[in-house]
Amino acid sequence: MGETVNQNTRLKLDVKRTLKVGLAFMGIMLFWEVYDYIMPLVSSNYFGLSTSEYGIIMGLDNLLAIFLLPFFGSLSDKSHAKMGRRTAFIFWGTIAAVISIVILMIVELQQFKLIEGTTLQAIQAIVEEAKKSATGELSSENRTQIVALFNQIVNDGYLTTQDVQVLSNPEFTITTITELQVLVARNLMITKPALLGIFILSLLMILVAMASYRSPAIALMPDVTPKPLRSQANALITFMGGVGGALSILVYKMFGSQKYESHILLWVVTAGLLALVLVLFMILVKEKQFVEKRLEEEKQANVVDEEEEEEKHGQKMPKEKFISLLLILGTVFLWFMGYNCVRSHMSNYATKFLELSQGFVGTINLFNGIGGAIALVPCAFLASKLGRKKTIFVGLGIAAVAFVPLYFMKANTPLVNVFFPICFIASGFGMVFINVNTLPMVTELSKGSNVGKYTGYYYVASMTAQAITPYFSGLVMGDSISTWNNLYIYSIVFIALATITTALIKYGDVKAEKANGIVDIINQDGAD
């Protein structure tokens, strides 16, 4: 579907070439994993924003992406830059992102200094020590110390006597302390609201910079890969993204900080790694040469781009194909509504609702990335054996099954620090099965001259969902920490809707072919 193949000349995926172009996506995921993890914590701990409020912050990048990704994708389609039409965007976009990260880091540091002037750090130190004790709970001595420290905050004018009345109950919990800490941060923010405004402006700078080269970076894969091999190539690109994500978690573990400590070193290392990845990309990727090789391979294998041929004869995309395109984009939208709500709230949810430590949550993210990388082999196998559509069904089923038990887990659930990571990592498996196959289904319906624009369409669907789902899922969760597990009901509903749109898709898939062994699976030529 979308091309014909001479079976006498078997197409084989150029793994080295694909991994090289995947460096750009590795850098993108390196940044976003750090950003998605740390921004909810900064927004809540430093600025005192509620779940719905920081949901808006977390949705800003995706809201901008709705407009910017198709624009930059289409712009790169028309580019005639000497270094390559996609490479030029990747080069300048990464440089702009590094500069913007430095500005964000400076603004965040100013807000941190306000936090540092209170007793919040001392309170948190007592809480962390209590968690490490044999009982994992606050002792009577801990409670007395915490009450005294909060009274100091009252004296400083950042809480009222009424605010701390909840501490008169000798059985107050760590959740009670967390809610008061957020209130203190909010009151600090109110004393200097301009910092929040500058913080948001610095975020916008980063988001525009990252959006400027995301579509071109992703469009580079289909530019250098024959159509029949794009699911397999996208699996390798996703693997590179997983490497970037795993690297970011290692960076967070090594250079991150506790709840009320500066993140300046984390941002410095992240910006430095982005710059290093760009250097490697510029050395290893020769875009124009790679595109010429792809065209030569397609010519030898007699691959005919049906969409390109239709345009030559004045034919537009048939209605049934257009409907399938809309359904694929609908599946992408619904899936990201259901999955990214969990991703965007995960760090706050795990540390506050489940009362897990930030370091442990960072470890969970690391293993989630590793799990996603492991999933690439069975994903490539299933895509070659079952086709893309059925593989997406498998991914949706895995994610739904993983999220159901998470609804019932609480801080006092036995072995929650074991079962929560298992379920979360399993959902990452499902994510890979879906993401690896949906983008190739979209580009399958594109032609060589507009693959960047179609990549932009894909990101309009995914980013629209990611723009609004943090806010709406935040409303469903509510401001009371005790109701935050409603997040998983919200998620499962959207995953169920995604199965319906997937079932109705008729175009964009590939035929299942026989393959023997992992090498044949990666090199599978499964053209319609």
Image (tube, rainbow, N blue to C red):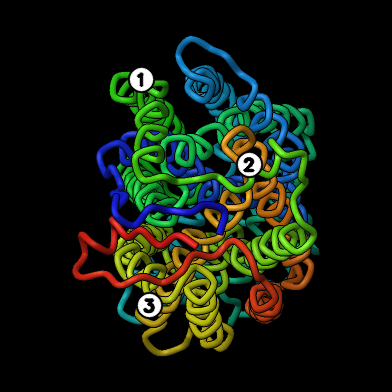
The kind of residue on which mark 1 rests is Met
Q: Secondary structure at mark 1?
A: helix
526 vs 493, left or right, is left
Residue 200: percent from the left, percent from the top?
72, 34
The kind of residue on which mark 3 rests is Ile
Residue 139: percent from the left, percent from the top?
44, 76
Quadrant of residue 372 in the image?
Answer: bottom left
Q: Nearer the viewer, residue 415 or 283?
A: 283
Residue drawn at (48%, 54%), measured in percent from left and top? Answer: 4
**How crowded is the residue under tag 3: few (<14 C-alpha within 10 Å), some, or many (20+)?**
some
Q: Secondary structure at mark 3?
A: helix
The kind of residue on which mark 2 rests is Glu
Residue holding disc 1? 282
Residue holding disc 2? 309
Give residue 422's mark: 3
Quadrant of residue 166 in the image?
Answer: bottom right
Marks 1/2: CA–CA distance: 34 Å
Q: Secondary structure at mark 2?
A: helix
Marks 2/3: CA–CA distance: 48 Å
* Callout 1 touching callout 2 (CB < 8 Å): no
Residue drawn at (57%, 23%), measured in percent from left and top? Answer: 100
